[in-house]
Every structure is written in structure tokens, then in C-alpha cells.
């Protein structure tokens, strides 16, 4: 069945206590709204996002990543509330799925279940061990008869453990008719979407409950909710990649961005962080290393290595306390304690301990280019812009300030000076 999708993303989210629009708070590297948009795109070619608070910022964020998304600015001054958010929207398909912009854990499979029933309205419901504080959904003979707010429940209704999860699939013609009929004669003076359920029941329409998993339809309203959702999303991401053949040691200590991809058999040791749209191919990332917006192919990094954005490693080993930034390393070994920034280093080259590419002069960044089979000795500084051609030896402790031709030795050392008897003289004859 063809379905239109409306995502309600107009709220301010005051409980987040943040200047960032609620729906743009990130979960596993992407704004929570993006997770919902992607689930919706798996079902529909007609998606409308309802905006109000910080509307321009939310719209700009979406348009920077997605095409063919429609936007509707809610008239929240005159028509506040979830029902008011639907005023003026014209879905193009016969069925409309209404989602909340703060449910980042929902999946396309879960949404499919809501649009499948042959009903005038299908509404998501959850069974809770403790439904205290929630409105109860009264179900009789497989159909929804009423949604009762807790304060209005009688004793029997208070024992009901079925509550509204807030997502609806509605016959579009019915939605068009009901939305203008909504009234705001309530204490909040808002137009509630839930009132369409009562309208449908009163008209004898079929309103069916669809029982869903609480974890998939969890709303995010606070920083604590954000952390809970992150944990669920991380478990989902890691399980997916382990099923694809990635080995993760102590998964609970590892963080993987939702945009990262793995190919072939990879190993992630404990404490690893993968941030951004990384591509990891047949590689081993050792304990407590951080990989950001980088590519690794047939390589290993760590322990405690750091690939900053724009790094590309192929058939390369970088060891503990090595930092690489915006550099391409092919067939390189850099075992310990080095910084390689804005550099291109070719195969067979060995980078000694303590080597630094001095890429920044306080105003601009410059490139360091190192050819094949170069040996750079420990504690050397390569002052960019500089090119070191193939088969060069750079002696330990050298500061390279000009290009080095192929086959040469580069060495700069202050002559060693010794002063006989200085120890006893300095310490006053201490034995």
C-alpha cells in the first residue's frame, strides 16, 4: 500500500535544557530526526516534516542531507498541539502514517506493521508493567474503544496496562475530515491528535491497536532519555556488524557511529571509538584507539592511536600514541609516538619514534611528501612544506627544512660537547 508520512518535529523540547533544537540532538553520530527520516524513506516517497521551534535550523539540517522532503510550518500561535500540527497538510497517498520526531529508535519493519492492517485507524500501543502516568487505551474485541487520561480513569481502567505509543496510520480522507473538526476546549487549550480516535469510534469506524515494542517507540525528551536511546542504538549497531563478521572485544566498551561501514573481517578491541563516516576494510583497531572520518584498508592501528578526519591508511601499521591527520599512508610503518599531519607517505617507509610533521606555521597548513623506502629516524622534525624523495635516510634528531633528493642522507646535529669532572664540581663533591 502507498503511504504518506508526516513527522511531527515542531516542539521546543524544554526538558533537554539546550539551545539545540530537540530533534537535532545526536544519537550515534546523527540527529535523532535523521534516524526517523531514514525509516520513513524506506516506506514512502511522500514525507512531510512539521516544523515550528527553530524551524530554519531544522530545515537546513535536513536539506543538507536529504532530497524530496516537504516541510510544513505549524501555526502554533493559533493551532498548538499535535492535532494543530496537521492543519493544512495534504498527503498525496490514501493512507497517512503520523510519526513523532523524537522517536529515533523506530525501524522500517515496525512501521510496516502499522500500515498493514485494513482499518480506518491503526494506532500503536504498548503494554507496560507500570503504566502509571500514562493514558490507558481501552480495547474491546480487538478494537480500540477509548483513550482515557489517567486522571479520568475509574478503578477498572487504572488496572489496564495498555498505553498509547503515539504513532498512527490513518485513512487520509478521514484525516482530512477530522483535523478541521478538532477543538481545543481543554486545560492546555491545545488541539490533540488523539481526539480523532474518539471521532472515529463515535462514527463506528475501525480503530485497531498494533502492539509494538517499547524500546522501538521510545520518546526522547531529556538528556537522560538521550543516553538511554544511545545505548539501545549502539547495541543495535554493534550486533548488526558482528552478524556481518566484525569481531568486537567487550562490545559494551566500544562506540560505533551509525555512518561507519565495515568490509571483510575486522577486529575492534576494547575501548575503541569509531566516529563519523569511516570505512574500515579488513583492518584491526587495537584498544582505546579513536578513528574519525577516516579510511583503513588492510591496516592496523593502536593501541591508543588516533586517526583524525581525512586520514587514509592502506597496508599500513600505526602504533601506540601515533596521531594521523588528513594524511595518506600507503605501506607505511609508524610504530610509536608520532604526529603525521597533512602528509603523503609512500610504501616501504618507516617513521621512527617521536617524528613530527611541522605542518602549521600559525597562519596556514602545509604538506609533507615522503616517497618510497624512506627511513626517518627517531625524534626528527619535518618542517613543511617539504618533499623527501625515494630511498632517503633521515638521521635521528634531524630537523628537515628543505627538500631531500633521492638516495641522500639528511643529518643535522649539534656536535656533542663533554666537560670532564663537571659532575663533582656541580654537586659539590658528592660521591
Image (spheres, helix red, strand yellow):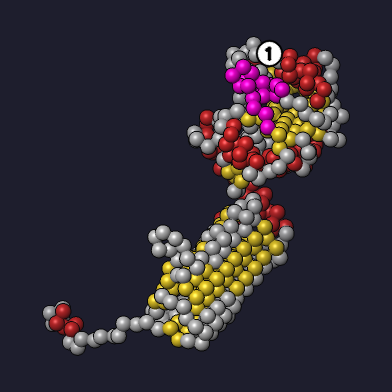
Residue 16: percent from the left, percent from the top? 52, 34
Q: Tag 1: Cα neighbours inside 10 Å, few (<14), some, or many (≥20)?
A: some
- Measuring from the top left, give residue 328's x and y in whole percent: 57, 68
With 319 as the anchor, is 60 left or right in this view?
A: right
Q: Nearer the viewer, residue 124 or 24?
A: 24
Task: Tell me: residue 425, above or below residue 129.
Answer: below
| Residue closest to the eye, 180 or 106 | 180
Q: Locate residue 270 relative to residue 209 in the image: left or right.
A: left
Image side of residue 426 versus residue 76, left or right: left
- From the top left corner, tell me how far across and down residue 391 is, in percent: 53, 84
Residue at position x 68%, y 60% in the image: 262
Place residue 143 in its image quadrant. Answer: top right
- For this orientation, the residue located farthest to the top is 185
Task: Locate residue 304 relative to residue 93 in the image: left or right.
Answer: left
Give the image quarter of residue 425.
Answer: bottom left
What residue appears at the point 76 percent right and 26 percent down from the top-left corner? 90
- The quarter of the displayed image where residue 218 is located: top right
Q: Label 1's element?
A: loop
Q: Position of residue 264 (x, y in %)?
A: 71, 65
Q: Nearer the viewer, residue 166 or 128?
A: 166
Q: Quadrant of the C terminus?
A: bottom left
- Please report the bounds of the magenta region as a residue range: 71-88
Let me know if residue 245 is in the magenta part. Answer: no
Does the magenta run of residues contain 81? yes
| Res 387 visible | yes
Quadrant of the snapshot with the N terminus? top right
Residue that numbered label 1 is attached to: 183
Image point (84%, 29%), residue name: 94
| Magenta stretch, main secondary structure class | loop
x 16%, y 78%: residue: 427
Image: 241 above or below 31:
below
Amino acid at each position: 500500500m502507498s503511504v504518506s508520512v508526516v513527522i511531527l518535529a515542531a516542539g521546543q523540547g524544554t526538558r533537554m535544557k539546550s539551545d539545540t533544537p530537540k530533534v537535532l540532538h545526536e544519537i550515534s553520530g546523527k540527529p535523532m530526526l535523521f534516524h526517523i527520516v531514514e525509516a520513513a524513506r524506506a516506506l514512502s516517497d511522500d514525507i512531510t516534516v512539521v516544523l515550528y521551534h527553530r524551524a530554519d535550523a531544522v530545515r537546513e539540517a535536513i536539506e543538507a542531507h536529504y532530497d524530496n522532503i516537504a516541510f510544513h510550518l505549524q501555526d502554533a500561535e493559533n493551532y498548538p498541539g499535535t492535532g494543530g500540527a496537521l492543519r493544512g497538510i495534504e498527503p498525496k497517498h490514501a493512507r497517512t502514517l503520523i510519526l513523532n520526531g523524537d522517536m529515533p529508535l523506530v525501524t522500517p519493519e515496525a512501521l510496516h506493521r502499522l500500515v498493514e492492517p485494513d482499518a480506518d485507524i491503526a494506532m500503536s500501543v504498548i503494554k507496560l508493567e507500570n503504566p502509571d502516568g500514562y493514558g490507558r487505551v481501552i480495547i474491546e474485541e480487538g478494537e480500540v474503544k477509548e483513550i482515557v487520561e489517567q486522571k479520568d480513569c475509574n478503578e477498572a481502567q487504572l488496572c489496564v496496562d495498555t498505553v498509547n505509543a503515539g504513532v498512527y496510520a490513518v485513512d487520509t480522507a478521514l484525516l482530512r475530515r477530522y483535523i478541521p473538526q478538532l477543538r481545543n476546549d481543554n486545560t492546555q487549550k491545545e488541539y490533540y491528535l488523539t481526539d480523532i480516535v474518539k471521532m472515529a469510534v463515535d462514527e463506528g469506524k475501525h480503530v485497531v491497536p498494533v502492539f509494538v515494542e517499547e524500546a522501538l517507540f521510545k520518546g526522547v525528551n531529556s538528556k537522560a532519555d538521550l543516553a538511554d536511546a544511545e545505548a539501545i542504538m549502539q547495541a543495535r549497531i554493534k550486533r548488526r556488524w558482528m552478524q556481518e563478521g566484525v569481531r568486537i572485544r567487550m562490545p559494551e566498551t566500544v562506540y560505533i557511529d551509525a555512518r561507519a561501514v565495515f568490509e571483510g573481517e575486522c577486529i575492534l578491541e576494547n575501548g575503541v571509538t569509531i566516529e563519523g563516516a569511516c570505512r574500515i576494510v579488513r583492518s584491526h583497531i587495537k584498544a582505546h584507539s579513536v578513528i574519525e572520518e577516516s579510511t583503513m584498508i588492510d591496516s592496523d592501528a593502536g593501541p591508543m592511536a588516533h586517526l583524525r578526519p581525512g586520514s587514509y591508511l592502506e597496508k599500513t601499521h600505526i602504533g601506540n600514541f601515533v596521531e594521523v591527520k588528513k594524511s595518506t599512508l600507503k605501506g607505511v610503518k609508524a610504530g610509536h609516538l608520532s604526529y603525521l599531519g597533512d602528509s603523503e607517505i609512500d610504501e616501504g617507509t618507516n617513521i621512527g619514534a617521536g617524528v613530527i610533521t611541522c605542518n602549521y606555521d600559525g597562519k596556514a597548513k602545509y604538506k609533507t611528501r615522503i616517497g618510497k623506502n624512506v627511513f626517518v629516524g627517531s625524534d626528527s622534525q619535518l618542517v613543511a612544506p617539504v618533499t623527501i624523495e625515494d630511498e632517503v635516510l633521515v638521521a635521528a634528531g634531524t630537523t628537515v627544512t628543505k627538500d631531500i633528493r633521492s638516495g641522500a642522507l639528511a643529518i643535522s646535529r649539534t656536535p656533542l660537547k663533554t666537560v670532564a669532572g663537571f659532575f663533582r664540581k656541580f654537586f659539590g663533591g658528592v660521591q
